[in-house]
Each structure stands twice: as C-alpha cells, then as structure tokens.
Amino acid sequence: MIPDHNCQLHMEDEDLVNEYIVSGVFISLRRKLKRYCLCDERHPEAKLMFKSKASIEREQSLHLYYFYNTVHPYSLVSLWMETFLVIAYGFMFFTIPIFGIIDVQIITDNVLIAYSTAFEIIVLLMMIWKFKVGCIKKSHIELDMKQIAVNYLKTTFILEISVLLLLPLVALQRHYINIANIEDYEIIPLLIIYMRVFTISTYMNRFQRFVNISSRLIDLLKLTFVMVVIGNNMTCIYDNQFNIALWKKKEGENASNDFFRLVDSFYTTYLIIMGANSHPLGPDTTKFRLFSIVLLLIGVVMNFLFFLFFFRLIKSFMEVKSQKLTFMRVMMEYMQYNEFTPALKKKILTYYDFKYGRNFYVEADINSVLPENVIRNINAVAFNHFLKKISFYHALTSNIVYQLSNSLVMKIFLAGDTIVHHGVIETSMYFIYVGTVAIYTKDGVEICHLTEGDYFGEFSLLLDIPKTASVVAIENCKVFKLSRDVLYDNLKNDPRALKLIKKMCLARAGRHDHNIK
C-alpha cells in the first residue's frame, strides 16, 4: 500500500513558461505576465470547461505553442479586465446623462473635454482588448487571432465604433462646439451604451464566483444598479425639461447654482417614483402629468422586482439551502455518534464537497422524473467517447457500445486513495472522468500520470491476472467503472466478438507485462 503520493516525476508545468521566455529584458516580469495570460484554475469558469488541473495544464501548453500572442478568456488578466470594464461602464452609466443631456454651467469645457477623452480611451481600450482576448463559440475556445477578429467584427464592433465616434460629439456640442440638429440623435449612442448592461451582468457573475461571495448579493447589486441608472436618467430628463424653468422662476433669472438644482431634481424624481409626494412637484401641465405617470409606473415595477427578488431569496433559502443544511446536520450527528476521528470527518466532508460543490441534488430524484430512454441516451452520449479509446472498441457493435455506456458506474476517490493495489486480481477497468492518478510498480517506483480521458485495468475485464502496478489518486478523482460481469452479460449473444477481444487482450497483456518489468 502506498499511503501518500510523493511525486517523483519531473513536472513540466513549473517550467512551461520559462521554455518560451528565455532571454531579454525584464524576463521575470514577462514570465509572470505571461502566466497571468494563460488559462488559470482560479478563473471561476475554467473548471467548468476543464474538469481537472491536468486538462488546464494541457490547455496552457497548447496556448503557448500555437497562440502565444493571444490572451486566454479564462485567464486572470481577462478576469481583471472584465472587472475594470464593470467599474468603467458603471461610471459611464451614471455620468453620461449628466454630461450629455443636462445643461449645467458647472461642467466647464475643460471638464467636458477630460471626460470625453477618458471615455474615448476606455472604449478604445476595450476594442483593442477584444482583438487580443480569445472568444468562446459553442463551447469551443477560439484563440486564433484571425478568427477572434472575424468574430468581433461580426458581433459588437459596429456598435462600439459608433459609440466611439458619436457620444463624444453629443457631449461636446453642448458646451464646446455647435453641430446643427445633433440633439435629435443624442439618444442613439446612449442606447447603444446601455445595451452593454447584459455583458456587464455576465462579468459581475464571474467576479462573484471568483471572490466567492453570495450570488444573491450580486443579484441585489445588479437590480439596484439598474434601478438607480433608470432613476438617474429620469432625473436628468426632469431637470432638463421642467426643473430649469421652475428653478429660474423660484430663484430668479440670475440663479446659477446648478448643483443645488440637480439635488432638487434627484429628490423630486425619486419622491414621484416612490409615490411619496402629497402635493404637486412640478408644473401644472399635461406633459408633466404624463411624465409623472411614467415615473409612477417605473416605481411600481421597481417595487415589484424588489419584492420578487426577496421572495425568491426566502424561497430558495427555505428549499434548497434548507435541504443541504439538513443533510449536513444529519451527517455531522452521524459522525459524532459513531465517534469518527477528525481525519475521517475531514475526508467525508471533502468527499461531499467534491461531489456536490455548491449544489445539492439527489440523482435518483432527477432520474425518477425522466423517461428511461432519455436517461439511456444521456449516458450513451456522455460515455461513448470513453469506450472509443479501448483497444477492442472496433470489435463491438453499436448496440453493445450503447448498452455498455449505460452500465458504467461512477466512483469517487479522494487525493491519496489507492484505486488499484499491486498483485490483486481485479475484474473491472476504470475511465478517468476528472482528476489525475499516478501509476506505481511493485517496488513503489512512479511510472507515469494518467489524466481525464485515460483509462486503466483493461485486461481485468477478461483475464484473471494479478495487477502489475498500483494506481493512486493524486487529486480528487471521478472515475467510471466497467465490470467484467457487465461486459460478459452484453457479449453473451456474440461469442465471436468475445473470442476476438480475449485474443487481443492476451497479446497486449504480454507486451504490457514486459514493459512494466
């Protein structure tokens, strides 16, 4: 038995970047930056696409070899850039109405030019970034720069170049230049900018998973953000259409304190939205009455959405979270009652966390509501690519492959667990779905590592020979097990295929045993 895995093999990933950056100035800094540009397991979506550390390392190697000058979409640099864009666009959403719609004297020409320049730099930086970072198309990561450019040009490039050209003109024309009739088109770039709210929402979700905070908190922030932006824009419309005239009438024609007028506009607008006004807050005109009705409708929608959010929050907590907490409480009581050691408790909790993550479900309950043929089709699609790698796959009919796909059983092994012991006669083979295992000889010499997509124990399905090596999980692993009884049961009506498979296994077993020795 091998109690602990102490890797004796040279790990290439430590020197992977060093092999590509071997000279030049600031070599340490360049290596560090390049590592940040590669796929990183700390990215919240990396482990959704790549099931183990080994597959992430393989992706890094392919990235460096074929697409050195691009940035991986699941890199830390990509995540930081997305976080910066969330902050930058959030600032734009709040300030565009003030700089581009409201006519205030406190916004001087220099301030407006500085704002417009900063806006241009942010949008231009984002456009350059889109040509450098990989994109995801139908669960495929595209890192080729030509394909990235084609994809960007086909999607949002036209909209973003329009914003880059139009919005600064709209802002500047009020205080610095005079372009005839441009006011009629100022809403266009504003609407284009607001279309990015869905992209910003996606970026916020990734950031939430990265910093490991509650998704409900992010949902509340997004909802509050949208509502405040809407209120901000309605405030600007109120100020521009109604409050300027009211303020001059109230303070006199020489009234010049724009700051207090804006504060008054915010106060009045939100009072109307919340329905808290007990007396008229604007001019007695049909136009203002219609505007007030729109604000009241916005307020009703806001209240409904916030009520719906908190209702779903409570419902979710009472159902899913309650089930998980109940299960955990029962598990803790069970371990306490049986006086499990701290090490065993930790192992059980690690297993539970690895299997379910942040989710909690009972697979039997899900399968109970699905038709049997649907479940079998799901298994066939999910596991067929494993069976294709077996040496005797081509000796199997499609029907037998379909049956075997539905006979695989998932097993979970934690880091340090021995999956197969040397010298033991096994009757099953294993397919690695997630994780990495190490292969040891009888003398404890580490031979190699196997990662997801690999398999071992092929001969055990047909031959009663002792295991020539031990297999130990390096990290938490999910494997699928195929037993001899299942194979025989599916091949009982095809003795010719069974005979051919045995012959192939005997031939390969002889070569394999020679290699091990």
Image (tube, rainbow, N blue to C red):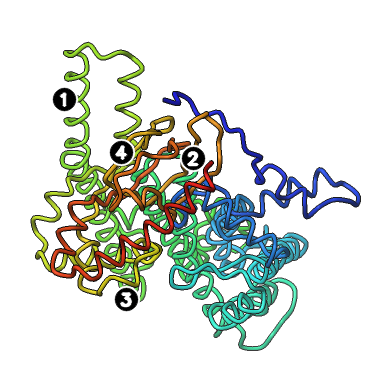
**Residue at the spot x=16%, y=42% of the render?**
319
On the rendered image, what quadrant is the C terminus found in? top right
Secondary structure found at label 3: helix
- The residue mark sitting in front, 4 or 2, is 4
Residue to which mark 4 is pinned: 425
Give the mark nearer the N terminus: 4 vs 2: 4
Residue type marked 4: Ile
Give the mark nearer the N terminus: 4 vs 1: 1
Q: CA distance from mark 4 to mark 2?
A: 16 Å
Instruction: Specify the farthest residue to the bottom.
Output: 180
Residue type marked 1: Val
Residue to which mark 2 is pinned: 439
Secondary structure found at label 1: helix
Q: CA distance from mark 3 to mark 1?
A: 65 Å
Residue to which mark 3 is pinned: 286
**Residue at the spot x=61%, y=60% of the render?**
72
How many neighbours does mark 2 have within 10 angstroms: few (below 14), some (14-19), or many (20 or more)?
Answer: many
Name the foreground residue: 359 vs 348: 348
Residue to which mark 1 is pinned: 330
